[in-house]
Image (spheres, helix red, strand yellow):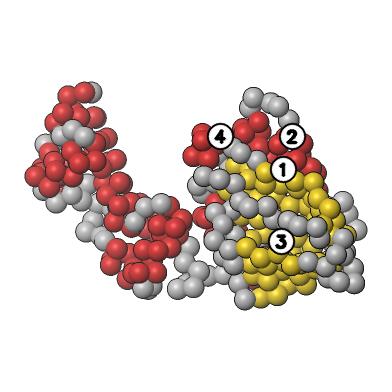
Amino acid sequence: MQSSPPLFIGDLVQSRRIIYQPSSFAMQNLLYLQETGSLTAIKPHTSSRQNLSSFLFFYVEEGEGSLTYQNQIYSMKKDDCAFIDCRNKYSQGSSSKNLWALKWVHFYGSAMGEIYSKYLERGGEACFSVDSEKPNPFVPILDLIMETASSSSYIRDMKINEVLSKLLTLLMEYSWNPEKARKSNTKCLNVSDVKAFIDQNFTAKISLEVVAAQFNVNKSYLLRLFKEYTGLTVNNYILQKRILMAKNELRFTNKTLDVIAQECGLEEANYFIRVFKKIEGLTPGGYRKRW
């Protein structure tokens, strides 16, 4: 996976930018940096992006500008912040009268979809203001990200993961707006709730259709959203949970294959054997003998 395209290009800004290349380990297991930097606009400009596997946080140090995101236009000024999902289309640009200066970070991780969903659920917004009478708490974090990305530390990816976690923790603190909290509905289904429902009921006869009915959403919408945030279809996630339980039963009990199949929601032994071998590469009996 390549890092995101540069956020600002051309001769309209003066900037310091690091386009970071994380290790494959970081991309698979950690919060990882794609790009970070700071800029000062020298002319009015507009920059647009869409379909990036990235999340963007930026802070307005000076001046004014705007962000267009999710069909809304946000006017931004000094001490305003933005936190957005770059898989959606967005654009931002400096005003012509009071050119802005920004600091930003593009980053990603396998759980970021669910984290951002939780951010919105708590009342988080694409743009928000911090108290201009106090030191901006996001500035030291952005500076530390830049410093860490510039270092030669052999555990640099781990350090970046730690700092990005601090950034998300601070964002979660700022997002706590109970009066604005969004409820799960067809427009903002909480995938964490869907996973929790499956985790509690996967041994029963559930499927994509059953889960969609439980949350009163279209099954095509559920399938798309669930796969986007987890990398799995609903049915594959259910099957994954069942096989994991079956492996545990095979290791730590003497139950027959028929009993394990029924308890794990895998119907009967023959079906259990076929599915288990396809996923694990050996039969349930062969797996049991290994332990």
The disc at residue 244 is none
**Spatial CA span between label 4 and label 2:** 15 Å
Dot 4 or dot 1: first in sequence order is 1
In the image, residue 18 lies at what x, y percent? 72, 43
- For badge 3, the amino acid type reads Ala
Between marks 3 and 4 in the image, the one whose residue lies nearer the viewer: 4
Q: Which residue is mark 3?
A: 82
**Residue at screen point 73% across, 30% down:** 151
**Spatial CA span between label 4 and label 1:** 15 Å
Looking at the image, do the residues carrying marks 4 and 2 touch, with CB atoms under 8 Å apart? no
Looking at the image, do the residues carrying marks 2 and 1 touch, with CB atoms under 8 Å apart? yes
Asked which quadrant contains residue 249, the reply is top left
**Spatial CA span between label 3 and label 1:** 20 Å
**Spatial CA span between label 3 and label 4:** 27 Å
The disc at residue 18 is 1
Q: Nearer the viewer, residue 236 or 135?
A: 236
Left-right relation of 46 to 134: left
Q: Is residue 149 in sight in this rendering?
A: yes
Dot 4 or dot 2: first in sequence order is 4
- For badge 2, the amino acid type reads Ser
Asked which secondary structure carries label 2, the reply is helix
Asked which secondary structure carries label 3, the reply is strand
Q: Which residue is mark 2?
A: 150
In the image, residue 29 lies at what x, y percent? 51, 38
In the image, residue 184 lies at what x, y percent? 49, 69
User: From what the image shows, is residue 145 above or below residue 103?
Assistant: above
Q: Which residue is mark 4?
A: 23
Q: Residues within 10 Å of mark 1 (few under 14, many from 20)?
A: some
